[in-house]
Amino acid sequence: MSDANSLPRNSGYLDALSQAIHKKLQRALANSSQRRNLLQELFADVALEVDDRAKDVIFNKEEDVISPVNYAMDGPLCFYDVLAGYFVQVPESGKPVLDMIVQLWSQSFASHIFSLLFHKWMFEVHLDNPEVLLRYSSALVQGATNVFWIDIQTNTKRFQSIFRYLLDDVALDHTRLNKIPLQAQRDMYLLLSRFILFYNSAGKVDSFLKQCPVFQTAFLVGGPADIFVNELTDQLQKLKVEPVLLHYLSEIKVLQGTTSTISGMELRMTTSTRLKTLFV
């Protein structure tokens, strides 16, 4: 992403997209009978892969403002990837969209859309109201959970860039993680524990667990390694898509032979027993 302090000269296209999103949200708010369908359509729109024509406009080589290098990823580049970065660069462009989403908080697909468009904004734009931070953090975790499950159910990784951002740029970077309330931090770690193997990040489990704060509930549920194993085993029980289950079981081999400790952290006896069942 280019310098957040400079307004990109080709922002007209992205601003037009922002206005189109805002108008659709307005329609959803005004039309209760069509609200769910309109929000579902909007979610599908922002999750679309950026076509070649749009890439030529967004990544204008002559202006050299937004570089494709800054969006390098394993999967497809989607509109939400570009808009999420734009709303950090130009927060005022995203504010009308955010205000509309807040009015639609309780509606299906509202948290999905919020997580797609504002997962970077949450951590890179200054917010100083604790209540607002908690509300946004909860919506982010809920929305991210929903879209990650869509990837699991379809055995795709369309939303992998969101996971990678939350893992690499938030969970492994305490300067960003500490911007959200402690309860939201815990919820974030629970979320990432469930999906870290799905998104091919088994090699980062060690760093992930060592960065995890010790929460107040540790005396009840154990430390970071116990939480990780419990969330992972619970996740496996929910999986219904066979290729995804096989992928998890393949990735989980990284833990084999370490059923009493993970990342140097000793597991509780009950947790160790749960982990051993995965290798039977």
Image (cartoon, grey):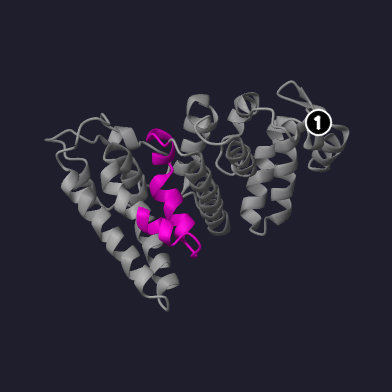
Q: Nearer the viewer, residue 108 or 250?
A: 108
Q: Nearer the viewer, residue 147 or 181?
A: 181
* Most distant residue in the left direction: 62
Q: Three-letter amino acid code at disc 1?
A: Thr
Say above or below: 259 vs 158: above
Q: Give left or right: position of 161 versus 193.
A: left
Which residue sits at x=70%, y=31%? 224
* Most distant residue in the top direction: 264
Say above or below: 9 vs 204: below
In the rendered view of the protein, which quadrant contains the N terminus? top left
Instruction: Tell me residue 55's x, y (percent).
Output: 23, 47
> How many numbered callouts?
1
Q: Which residues are magenta?
A: 99-127
Instruction: Tell me residue 115's x, y (percent).
Output: 45, 49
Find residue 34 and report its image quarter.
bottom left
Q: Is residue 199 magenta?
A: no
Q: Nearer the viewer, residue 89 or 31?
A: 31
Q: Give left or right: position of 241 versus 18.
A: right
Residue corresponding to mark 1 = 259
Q: Give left or right: position of 79 versus 13.
A: right
Please say whether residue 244 is visible from this viewpoint. yes
Q: How crowded is the residue under tag 1: few (<14 C-alpha within 10 Å), some, or many (20+)? A: many
Which residue sits at x=48%, y=55%? 111
Q: Secondary structure at mark 1?
A: loop
Instruction: Tell me residue 268's x, y (percent).
Output: 84, 31
In the rendered view of the protein, which quadrant contains the C terminus? top right
Say above or below: 32 vs 102: below
Instruction: Tell me residue 166's x, y (percent).
Output: 50, 37
Find residue 264 and report its image quarter.
top right
Q: Is residue 115 magenta?
A: yes
Q: Give left or right: position of 218 versus 164.
A: right
